[in-house]
Amino acid sequence: MIVPFGHLLMFAASLFVLGLCCTLLRREIIMILIGVEIMLNAAALTLVGGAAYWQQSDGQVFVILLMAITAAEVAVALALVVYLKQRKGTLVADAFDRMSG
Amino acid sequence: MTLTTALPSFPWLSLLIFLPLAGALLCLLHHRQATECRWLALGTTLATFTVTVWLFCIHGEGAAGWLRYEEATWVGAYGIRYSLALDGIALLMVLLTALLQVVGVLLAWSVQRQTGLFLALLLTMESGLLGIFLAHDLVLFYLFWEIALIPMFFLIGVWGHERRRQAALKFFLYTLAGSLCMLVAIIALYLIHGEQTGHYSFLLSDLLQTRLTTAQEFWLFAGFLAAFAIKSPIVPLHTWLPDALTEAPAVGSVDLTGLLIKTGIYGLLRFAFPLFPVATATFLPILGVLALIGLFHAAWSAFRQDDIKRLLAYSSISHLGLVLLGLAAWTLTAWQGSLLLMVTHGITTGALFALVSMIRQRTGSRDLRQLGGLWSQAPCLSAFFLLFALASLGLPGLANFAGEILVLLGTFATHPFWAAFGMLGVVFAAAYMLRLVQGVLWGEPGPATAGAAAIADLDAREWLILVPLALITLWLGLYPAPLLRPLEQPVLALLGGLP
Amino acid sequence: MATALFYILGFTLLAATLLCITRRNPVHAVIYLVAGFFALALMFYLLGAPLVAAWQVIVYAGAIMVLFLFIIMMFGLTPQESLAGTGVQRWLPLALLSASILFCTLLLIAQDPAATTTGDATFYLAPRDFGTALFGRYALAVQVVSFQLLFAAVGAFYLGRRPDREESS
Amino acid sequence: MTWLDLLGLIPQLLLLVGATTLLLAGAWYREPQPLFAGGVLVALLAALAAGTCPPPTTEIAGLFHSTPYARFFTIFWALLAACSLLLSLRFVTEQGLPAGEYIALVLFAATGMTLLSAASSLVGLFLGLEALTLAFYILIACNRRCPFSAEAGLKYLLPGAVATGFLAFGIALIYATTGTFALPDALHGLQGESGLRPWGLLGWGLFFCAVGFKISLVPFHLWTPDVYQGAPAPVAGLLATGSKGSVVAALIGMLLVAGPLWHDLTGLLATLAAVTMLTGAFTALVQTNLKRLLAYSSVVHMGTLMVGLLTQTPAGLAASIFYIVVYVIASLGCFSVIVSFAGPNGELQELENWRGLGRRYPVRGTVLALLLLSLAGLPATAGFMAKFAVFHAALQAGLLGLTLIGLCAALVSFAFYLRVIMLLFMADESSASQPAGSVHEHAVLAVCASAVVLFGLFPGILFDLIQRLLP
Amino acid sequence: MNETLLFLIPLLPLCCALLNMLVGMRLPRLFAETVAVSGVATAFVLTLLFWDYASGAGTRATLFTWLASGDLEIAFALHFDRLAAPMTLMVTGVATLIHLYAVGYMHGEQDYARFFGLLNLFVFAMLTIILADNLLVLFLGWEGVGLCSYGLIGFWYRKLDNARAGTKAFLVTRVGDVFLGIALLWLFALTGSLSIGVINAAAADLAPAVLLGLTLLLLLGACGKSAQLPLMTWLADAMAGPTPVSALIHAATMVTAGVYLLCRLFPLVSLSAAGMAVITAVGALTALYAATCALAQREIKRVLAYSTMSQVGFMFMAVGAGSVAGAMFHLLTHAFFKALLFMAAGCVIHLAGEENDLFRMGGLYRRGPVELFWIFLIGAVCLAGVPLTSGFFSKDAILLAVFTHPDPVYRLFWGIGVLTALLTALYTFRLVYLIFAGEPRGQGAPHPVSLAMRWPLWPLAGLALLGGGLNLPALVGGGERLHHWLGDLGGRTIAAAHSTELRLIALATALVLAGWAIAHWRYRRFAPPTEAALVQFLLHGWQADRLVDRLLVRPFTATAHFCSTGCDRGLFDGTLAGLASLAQRTGALLRRLATGRVSTSLSAFAWGLLVIAGWLLLQLASRGGHG
């Protein structure tokens, strides 16, 4: 393998944390979803790296499945975004706080 | 005797427990027709009472070991068994329970709202109480322990007086807090025993074989004690009782004071003491002192109350202080006295609560400052009131005195000063009881008494309730021997347990 | 050579992502992210996953991100909120939180004695083997995922529907 | 993956095919009743299949178990799906929702549950969990007339998506550490002393974050009350029982095959469980909305279940299985009472509206009281046996502190359950007239109530069954 | 005859009592009265019939076992012996007469059944005390008489003061009962039995300290019932009851129960010299105290009540001096003349128009039937101890016994006794003068005194005059019959030179004369009452009530208040409420976590992750630390 596995994981971890930061720092639903996408990509990177490290195909296969699932999720999520926008006119997540306690 | 030999294997104890349950179910099914339910409940309780009396007749002589024993597997996975056992002590409590429930149903005759449900709950509680006194498997015991709780919760909360909800909640949670501690202790004991013997069982007779380190004993004993001390109630864990008793409907008060708080003491002497002898030996002096504190604290508090039911509640606590004193004395005489006193107190105080409810129905008040001069309007009612009040202040020749003097005689042998103080408590009892009598019976008619247009004297149903209780009060006062006899063997067995 | 390239790509990826999450304009953000994903695709390729790399470009950058872009454009989302809402006290704690998470993670890695172990030489998974793996052992997974896509489509269709009047009222 | 494997998958296939068929049928045929009948039929058939035809292999395609344990939960979730379809009929009709889609989604969610609780590899687990979650994203938001529904959907979607990210990255790290997805082996990331161990631990940490979100452990529980409140009652019922139950079932299965592990995580999870129980109990104490109260009570229950899992002993796992089954039954019953009181213009949520309802509708009131008491753990109901078993196992495993905390939580729980019961029965004034509820709902109620009583009086039945499930 | 028949003596009144209580109101009045009187009368006759049983060691009769537990065995058993017999005779006899009197006295009373029921019940209880073979049965009677006196003092319950007086009597006597009860417990612990015979037999080998303790406990018990210091405050108020009740319970019988108790247990009591001295002291002081109080009373019945107290004090002195015979002698004679006085007082009150106050009487000699004056005078002279009356002999015997006691301190008691004798004569004649002499001062129209109220007085008058014959000292040629009848139960025999006896007799006579002279000089013609502080002090019984209130009642109620309000409401309930509100506040606090904003739950995620990562770090660090 071309790089120390630890370094690769370090890249992945940083990517993941960046995604997490995105979900934490941003307020629009869209951006939060994008943050999630970043986290998933970090996962993908790790998986591919793992596949390379263990000389297996499973990791890469799982990446494909992951992509498909992400696609499905994003479809639903964006549909919901459209729905919410139609109802409430805003996409700021914290605007939806009618239920609390 | 011939009948028992004829039916050696008939499960009388199970019958005792399931008869009221069946009655409760029937009442639930017919809860629309109040009258049917009343007769149904009366029939059920009477049948149960008959069975208990019959058991008493054949086992009246008492014997060492169990008089009856029934057992079946219940939850195999945990070695929980459905096992009932009857000995002299249980026999006495069962008798008291069955009797008081008959009285309770008669008292509940006047309940108008949702009579069917009321009676169903009453009967459920009866089987719960009987179960408590008969259970020989600790989980089964815990089950009945809680089952007896929930109907009382509803009786207080639905049919109670002004502040019923708070009282019901306080009663339930307070008692539950103790029960949970006991549950932990039970399971821990079960595990310890299982690890020692490899035979996992909740049977009391098995668990008695457990060898415990002192530390273990103390912790487990504390767990049991938490439940029983709250239920008994031992001062300072008693404050739930006055509220509950005051807010409960008449029947609720009768059962609560007559039976439910007795279960705590029964649990102490049936489970806590035999299972943890070392801890018990260390604890007995503390118990004695606590009992005396309770005796006087409650008597003093009772002296200040204006609400009759509150006053009677405190008097119950005071009497139970004497009962506990007898237990702490750890002599045959004292224990027999305590057990006798439990029964007699149940009867006399129960009757008093019944009378209070009758008075309240007539005058609409329970307040000493509102009542007064009742004798001039309802002499028979007042006479009964006086009789039971005197019995409850321990007049010789009436029921309570027999128990009290036995307790004191037995206690003096081991702890003279406790007994002397206990004797002093007699005056205190006189103080608050005479205040009660004076406030209700004597003087000019008070606002409430005068306000009520014409105060009817006892009607047939009330005669039916009071006369038997009065007769029993006299009988136990003059000839308690029949009740003491079956106690002797089991009490001796329990007393022997102490190192 | 490849190693150096890998590091360059890695840092590009991080930089692009950082820019993405700090852009106020969503469109810019998405564009940066797409750029980052291209870098990621290349890293996949370097790690011996050509097919995954391709799909990363096609599906992720090509489809999913475009979907995002489409939604953003559709609503014409102008940058309405400043970064992390209102001012320092709003985002500083969160930033610190994320920083500490990163710190912990890196510390964890530092615990790792084998951080520098590199496996043997290059690993290259040919598309054929990939296909056999995907449709052999993981056929069932593929089925499940396909159903998932189906129901996602159903749900998206149902949720995205224009509201009729008594709903909107 | 061979044809033999498919034999083991008959129930799932039945569910999926049935779901698709009903979906298509719904496109042409708008009448709800027959569609729902079909849905229930499919669910029952699936349960029947799982019960009757034993699979030839114990594992399918290296992804899912087909052990008795897996099949038990397959049956259970299929029946649950049937029940929740019965509960949904009136709701769907009154709200004019497209029946086909709804049924299909419920069945798909059920499939997800069965797969999840049968997962034998992290891939299977991920797939099942995602299927489940995806279906719920839509179901929660499905009531387009109720503004809360959409909000609830959002509040489930965003954390759910983040949780998916956590789960994916966690699994990825575990894979990177151990080089496999298969469960017993993949756990070495925790046990072995390999160089990459810290990564494995981190992976499991992330994994537990995601799981904690699904079963709403503190601090990942914040979505629960809002989603319960906003989601339609039938969906909330399914969410409270199915999604949580199947995740717990998956964890139990994991522990069953792997034996004791998590030496490093035990303390953490114990703290988590303790905090969860207490937080849930105390917060539920001050709730004024029945669904929110049930949400927090479910938090308490999940904490208690964690105690059961933490024992990591066969007894503890058996107790947890018993607990989850009983919990599912009781809380489904509670939600079906809510459903039965729901009308075309909304549900009965605020506790104030429940005042005196037990007097006016004694049967449903009594059943609700019974179920709540079972949730609280009163003896002679199944709930007591469940708590008893769990705490018994905990003491056996020496988790005294957790047991005591659990009992404190139980005490507080009694307080808030009794508050509801007192409102039902002990209020002076009587309530306004409420919907009578349909036959289906009453049927579900009857099933739940009788099950609670049956398992309370004769827990032996269930215990013995569970004993036969364990390997 | 079968000795079990002895039980008829107490049980007959009991049956009549129950009959009256249960169905009395439904019976015609005459029948109820007949039942009541006949019950007691029959008991009297039976006593005479069974007299022989008393001779020798007496007769024991057992009904059935009351309490049995382990080695404890207590039966309902009677012991009819030479001490019990005369007492029984006196009680039944006097009670019969008083019942007859009551028939007349309570003529207008509607609630007659309750009255006669209680009266009969009292007789039963009193007889139980007298005949009891073991202390527990005695205790039963002991409490029984207390109960009846409670019920009868408060008979007119509509006036709350009467009920209060009854309650007070019951409580104060109950205080004494506590000590009796403790003594009972202790005796059982010591001797293993409660039978009086066994206890008296076993008393010999008890430690002196123990004996002293027991004696004091018994004494306190006796003081409660017999209204001796310090438990005397209830008797004066007890006069709120109907006059027959005062005559029967608070003059003739119940108040002497204490004396009887000490006589019963004399073998035990006499073993402790110190104890005996204390008994004498209590008696002497009470006698003096009561006599002084009697001097200043305004109500006729209160005067008699205090005089009763004082006379009972004399009996205590006798017991203390070791002369049971003297005590019993005075007990019997006192029963006669004091009952007589009370009943006569009842008539007087009737005549004065229900007027109690001496200062509003006067001149009754002319108004009323003249026989009443003579009857009252007979009672008075006996009380005052005019020579040759019964009171004279009995009191003289006591003073002699005290005088001849070897212990010098008894001389002091004797002095007190002598002083008291003087005061007795004084207040007695004061009474007579205030009632009969001078002009009528009251306004009340005189009620006619029915025959039924008058004729029962005559036999009593006769007994009072001639009662001395029971135990006539040898000096005047008497055979000391009672003393010989009692025999070994009679305590020590008083052996004194005739000269001393004569001197004492002379002294007594002089005292009586002095007392009469003073009374004559002071009260011959009425002088309006003085409000002097001393008079007030004596009038209120040395302010004993106020003292008790300060020392006991107020602290008691204060403690009660503390217990019920301070402890229960404040401390215990307060703690519970605190816990509850703590839980609520915790809930409210945690509730604020759920802000309902998505960002909150997302950051919660992050926190969770941080915690987990931190935890793992700690784990690995510690692990690294290890290896």
Image (cartoon, rainbow, N blue to C red):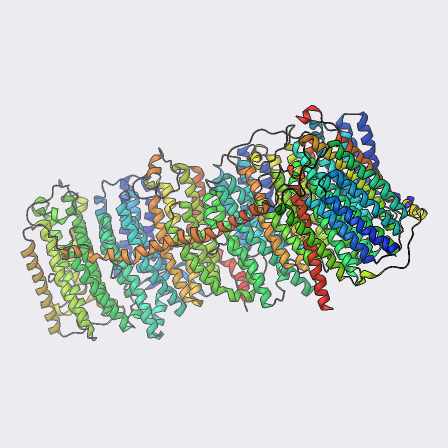
Whether residue C78 is visible to the viewer of this picture, yes or no, is yes
Work out which quarter of the rendered image holds the C terminus of chain D and state it.
Answer: bottom right
Horizontal and vertical percent for residue A16? 76, 50
Left or right, residue D462 beside residue B210:
right
Whether residue D247 is visible to the viewer of this picture, yes or no, is no
- Looking at the picture, does residue B43 appear above or below residue D249? above
Left or right, residue B267 beside residue E293:
right
Horizontal and vertical percent for residue E76? 39, 59
- Looking at the picture, does residue D138 appear above or below residue D306? above
Q: Residue furthest right?
A: C128
Which quadrant of the view contains residue D44?
Answer: top right
Horizontal and vertical percent for residue B166? 49, 44
In-front residue for pair A2/B477: A2
Residue depicted at 60% across the width and 29% down the height: D434
In-front residue for pair D161/A32: A32
Left or right, residue E71 beside residue B40:
left
Residue depicted at 24% across the width and 50% down the height: E245
State how many labels appear. Answer: 0
Which quadrant of the view contains residue B292?
Answer: bottom left
In-front residue for pair D59/E443: D59
In-front residue for pair D15/E335: D15
Horizontal and vertical percent for residue B232? 50, 54
- Looking at the picture, does residue B80 appear above or below residue C37? below
